[in-house]
Amino acid sequence: MAAEGGGKEMNEIKTQFTTREGVYKLLTHSEYSRPNRVPFNSQGSNPVKVSFVNVNDQSGNGDRICFNVGRELYFYIYKGVRKAADLSKPIDKRIYKGTQPTCHDFNPLTATAESVSLLVGFSAGQVQLIDPIKKETSKLFNEERLIDKSRVTCVRWVPGSESLFLVAHSSGSMYLYNVENTCGTTAPHYQLLKQGENYAVHTCKSKSARNPLLRWTVGEGALNEFAFSPDGKFLACASQDGFLRVFGFDAAELHGTMKSYFGGLLCVCWSPDGRYIVAGGEDDLVTVWSFLDCRVIARGHGHKSWVSVVAFDHCTTSVEDGDLPAEFSGSDEDFHEQNHFSAGRDRANSSHSRLSKRNSTDSRPVSVTYRFGSVGQDTQLCLWDLTEDILFPHLPLSRTRTHTNVMSATSPPATGQPPSTLSTTTSSGGTNSKDNLSNSSTSGNPTNSLPGTLPRSNSLPHSSNPAGGSTPNSNTGSSNSSSSTTATTKANSIIDSAFIATSVSKFATLSLHDSRKERHEKDHKRNHSMGHISSKSSDKLNQLSSSKMAKADAAKTLGTTLCPRMEEVPLLEPLVCKKIAHERLTVLIFLEDCLVTACQEGFVCTWARPGKVGLLSSQNNPANSPSGTVV
């Protein structure tokens, strides 16, 4: 178990924590789990996952929660901070034989009080479309496992679509489905549609419409998670080969890449405005990547084991100044309404320059803050603040940030790297029709010319290397990340192209199946919790998760814009780092009045935001508590 070892204080579970906005408190009566509340024996099972949807009913209880525990899938009314959870009355409960649910996703567009569309992915590769309110099973995709036999790692509805959804597998492939199409009785035949550096997109060759519409093969090994940008135009993929790859979804163009410090990437998320991507994985770090500049701008070190989930808190992400435009602040809905990649990019440009003026000419404080969180196999929850000293290191600060220390290495950081590298990466990033924010706002200051004294938000007192993160020597001169982003965006949509197989008949088909199987067999299991990773264990992880060639590639990327050295980028320390569970954590979701976590024992916990805990006080009497109920 993750909690083994250490003294009594080490294993103490926290029920509240404090940030600058106040105290977050665990609501014990709002805990969701299996009805008998017995901890689930999680050895060898798939991670517990949680999905939410709002059905907009008139009662004010519109939130619905779905979570999987082992072979079981539950669907409840989610009462959050308002009322205690009644586990004796699930709206729907399903127990599966021979396969386990691994992930799920609601379609928010079609959700009503009478009907919801829920996609469920399984360990054997199938995807089921169910309606837990009507208690119907509408369709089963990949039923005969002819499309892919490997575990489903991530399933998502395509934003803005009522019928298209994307499914990722541990084989390293992603498939685009249409709920209206059948899957066919024979294995699909594919034609190459588009190919780039370590990825390929194929269309399904068929006389009639059938699933899958498209097959993406991305990187080496498993594709652990993907996430759509807030406007739905871009797709970020976190892979077991340690690479983050960001694609323009419709045109299937590679926008940019990033490499983990070592090991695989397990999770990824976007900031609410689409400017930044955070990824976490087997290097115990959270890595912040700028979408506009296509480069790592910060790393966060607080976890003692693999990072399993990262998520932005849209309610705490803001600009604390009235003069700056509303693009930086506001609710999640505001961000979704803006198409910031078109006209919004111009507004962002002006806001950036306005921020520059305020910082350089005015002594009044301007505080740009992005809040994000992470949970890991070390059973810890970490909260992080991304502040303007990290986001805009070339601007003079209007006030001193929380002790930003000089790091141990004060030599010029980007040794041997030409200043033009990042600007070429950005300008050739497959996003023509967009303004180049870094070029227009930095006024001649190269994007990667970091100051000699690197800022560290809540600076760590010790050396910059994380646990197990020994820095091998490598040639720092070759930072050729621009080659991965040389393709320019085509006007035509690749989804449209998928329906017209005849237009791509001139392309040859790639046979990737055998090598995929071999890689899948070599993939190591991530079902166990790990303690502090030492240098030796990191070597073992590298041997298990990658080939000798991959190791050589990793040595080449270290010290480049794909993977800067630890001393070359700011190192964040968490605002909060608390042990909140006995078993590894698998869920972190930020809601309006609370945040939700879940651990592998099957307990889904609600943490009330500051000032929201009083809503439950009238409900906290023994009569309403279901804690003693066994069903």
Image (tube, helix red, strand yellow):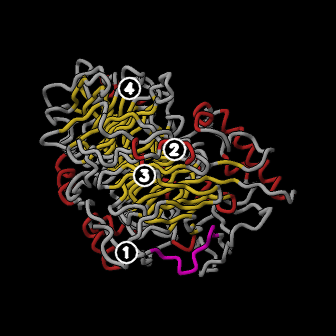
Determine the CA span between mark 3 and mark 1. Answer: 30 Å
Q: Is residue 148 shown above or below 59?
A: below
Task: Give me the C-alpha separation between circle 3 and circle 4.
Answer: 51 Å
- Earlier sequence position, callout 2 versus callout 1: 1
- Please, what is the three-letter code of the amino acid marked with disc 1? His
Q: Mark 2 and mark 1: span between their CA atoms?
A: 38 Å
Q: Can I make out residue 215 in this image? A: no
Local packing at callout 4 (Cα closer than 10 Å; few below 14, some 14-19, many 20+) is some
Residue 532 disc label: 1
Query: Percent x, y for residue 195?
Result: 36, 42
Residue type indicated by callout 2: Leu
Q: Which label belongs to residue 28?
A: 3
Residue 444 visible somewhere in the drawing: yes
Q: Quadrant of residue 345?
A: top right
Q: Which residue is mark 2?
A: 616
Q: Earlier in the sequence, mark 4 or mark 1?
A: 4
Q: Secondary structure at mark 1?
A: loop
Q: Is residue 292 left or right of residue 364?
A: left
**Residue closest to the eye, 202 or 11:** 11
Q: Nearer the viewer, mark 4 or mark 2?
A: 2
Q: Which residues are magenta?
A: 456-466
